[in-house]
Amino acid sequence: MISKLDAIQLQMFEKVKKVRDERTTVVYKWEDFNPALEAGNLIMTPWCGPEWVKEESKKISMRGEEEDEKSSTSVAGKSLCIPFEQPDLPEGTKCFATGKVATCWCLWGRSY
């Protein structure tokens, strides 16, 4: 028998999981990264490990505006994790940022 608290937790988990899944988009090209980020999505990309994504996405989002302490991190794309459960990555899939062969999928978002 499931307790009332377990039922509430399960209901809350399923609700937020649905929202997360609806707000996760797959991006294969760098030029599609910032628009997806600015739409408030989590982004799944094929990835080979470049370190410059955060700085480049920040530059694009700032659009030449003055940087302050708050905006310097909140507009940049940030790697969230390399998921344990990886979708299939077809052989030869290119990294969205460098065009080199991707080694895994990476999940991206924004810091707030």
Image (cartoon, rainbow, N blue to C red):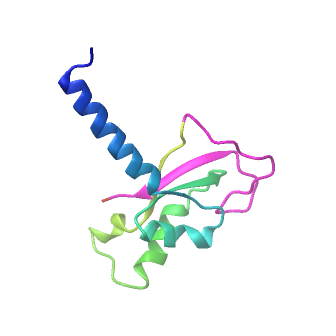
Residue at 36 percent across and 39 percent down: it is 14
Say if 55 sits above or below 17 in the image: below
Q: Quadrant of the C terminus?
A: bottom left
Extreme right residue here? 92
Q: Locate residue 2: give its quadrant.
A: top left
Pinpoint residue 42: horizontal percent, then vertical percent: 46, 56
Quadrant where the image shows the N terminus: top left
Q: Quadrant of residue 95?
A: bottom right
* Identity of the residue drawn at 46% across and 50% down: 21
Whether residue 11 is in magenta: the answer is no
Total marks in image = 0
Part of the protein shown in magenta:
84-111
Q: Is residue 74 visible?
A: yes
> 22 or 31, which lies in front?
22
* Residue visible at 46% across and 66% down in the picture: 37
Q: Main secondary structure of the magenta part?
A: loop
Q: Position of residue 65 (x, y in %)?
A: 36, 84
x then y, percent, for residue 43? 51, 57
Residue positioned most to the left: 4
